[in-house]
Amino acid sequence: MRPPESTAWHPASWQAKPAQQQPRYDDPSALERVVAELSRLPPIVVSWEVEALRERLAAAQRGQAFLLQGGDCAETFADCESDSIAKKLKILLQMSLVLLHGLKKPIIRLGRMAGQYAKPRSADSETREGVTLPSFRGDLVNRPEFSAEARRADPQLLLRGYERAALTLNFVRALVDGGFADLHHPEYWDLGFVKHAPLKDAYQRIVQSIGDALDFFEGISRRPVHEATLVDFYASHEGLHLLYEQAQTRFIPRQNRWYNLSTHMPWIGMRTAKLDGAHVEFFRGISNPIGIKIGAAMDEAWLQGLIATLNPQNQPGRLTLIHRFGVKDIETALPRMIEAVRQSGQAVLWVCDPMHGNTETSTAGLKTRRFENILKEVDLSFRIHADLGSRLGGVHIELTGDDVTECTGGARGLTDADLQRAYRSTVDPRLNHEQALELAMLIAERSQSRRLLHL
Ligand code: PEP
Ligand code: CO
């Protein structure tokens, strides 16, 4: 399929197209002032980091690395505090260590963090007891309480979101640079509240064995190897709020290209991927590696159109396709998509998001997901890709480092009744620390047995 007629791109060219999921602001001049200020403020990331990530994603496309993308469904301003950020970083590092051990390849760590503040909604408004108000669209836009004042889209929140993204990434960088990811500091690898014995024991064996391997290499090479292998961490968020993304988009003369410097890798959500829509227009002109969420509603021609429009030069590392079909649809939907990409002749990185297709409602009416379905979708993804001569190159997980009870199942066997205890998400249910680690261990274990069986 031919891409739509390309016309000149600039950071605001999306404004001529229909834009889904954008809030309505009641004071356009206040909004304009905020966007102008955001455009002047320094960027959150820099282009050489973005290029480094693209190169690593290109390696993952060739099967030489694996992507671990994870974090909250929506970050909140209230959770921008040291303990919560450190815990999230810690679980991602722990998962990456377990995956490194099982998959025997470098793990690219990509947080859904430092800017994951805007959410798409299925309806523009919400009605409670006869009162209708705008939907909550994430802390970047309005507040979750059900009052007219809280639900008013406030442009100042764009600035607050930018600041919190910068504070978060600043802290993450300091932790990582300061040795947070250093295996020689076992306290950073400690499991905290994870008490489930078999899980804890298996995890500790992995940490020990990697620690021993590091000691061995450092012994013979006489220099620390962890510095080269364990210190990178990148940020990603859904590129949803286009004025915010536009304001952080800069022309970098040295590279002679435009970059969205609000994050390393923005992704296009499932609800905003229309071929002739504003989001695709915006994304086609930025040079970052980008993700595209793919759900059951997308057909082959649509996907091929996106690939042609967003990566006309077939640049390695540019496109990551994040499929989120759910266990019920993956076996019919994924093979068609793999074939559509094969026909396009393009290199992409395939990543499984086993969260968003497996959402259901608990008996008490809470949004939840079953651990067994999440694991099953990852398993099916590995198998389907391998059967069709393709490759699953990563996973995309909603998780938190805290002890919440939002998803059921896992080693501790959380039930519907347990969900009430610590259900904190205002949007989608996340795996808690223990469940997230368990998922990584199961993925690693199964990959190891597949490798032994040469599958
Ligand atoms: C999300 O990642 O939180 C999300 C809304 O996903 P999707 O666009 O796949 O529904
Ligand atoms: Co979500």
Image: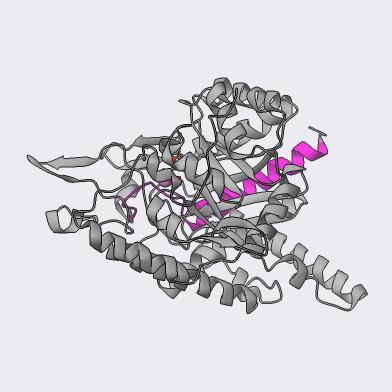
Image quadrant containing the N terminus: top right
Relative side of 119 to 276, left or right: left
Q: Is residue 404 visible?
A: no
Tell me, yes or no, whether the highlighted magenta stretch contains residue 397.
Answer: no
Q: Residue 313 in the image: x percent, y percent?
A: 69, 39
**Where is ligand 1, by quadrant?**
top left
Q: Residue furthest left?
A: 130
Please determine whether, in this image, residue 4 is positioned above or below residue 170: above
| Observer-nearest of 414 and 402 | 402
The quadrant where residue 223 appears: bottom right
Relative side of 207 to 220, left or right: left
| Observer-nearest of 54 and 66 | 54
Q: Residue furthest right?
A: 220
Please determine whether, in this image, residue 14 is positioned above or below residue 159: above
Q: How is the rendered protein coloured? A: one colour
Relative side of 157 to 101, left or right: left
Tell me, yes or no, whether the highlighted magenta stretch contains residue 445.
Answer: yes
Residue depicted at 63% across the width and 23% down the height: 335
Q: Residue 266 in the image: x percent, y percent?
A: 52, 51
Q: What stretch is highlighted in magenta?
A: 424-452
Residue depicted at 81% across the width and 34% down the height: 453
| Observer-nearest of 116 and 241 | 241
Q: Is the magenta stretch mostly helix, strand or loop?
A: helix
Q: Is residue 48 visible?
A: yes
Q: Residue 184 in the image: x percent, y percent?
A: 71, 76
| Observer-nearest of 158 and 253 | 253
Tally of numbered discs: 0
Residue depicted at 43% across the width and 60% down the height: 247
Residue depicted at 49% across the width and 39% down the height: 280
Q: Residue 12 in the image: x percent, y percent?
A: 43, 50
Image quadrant containing the C terminus: top right
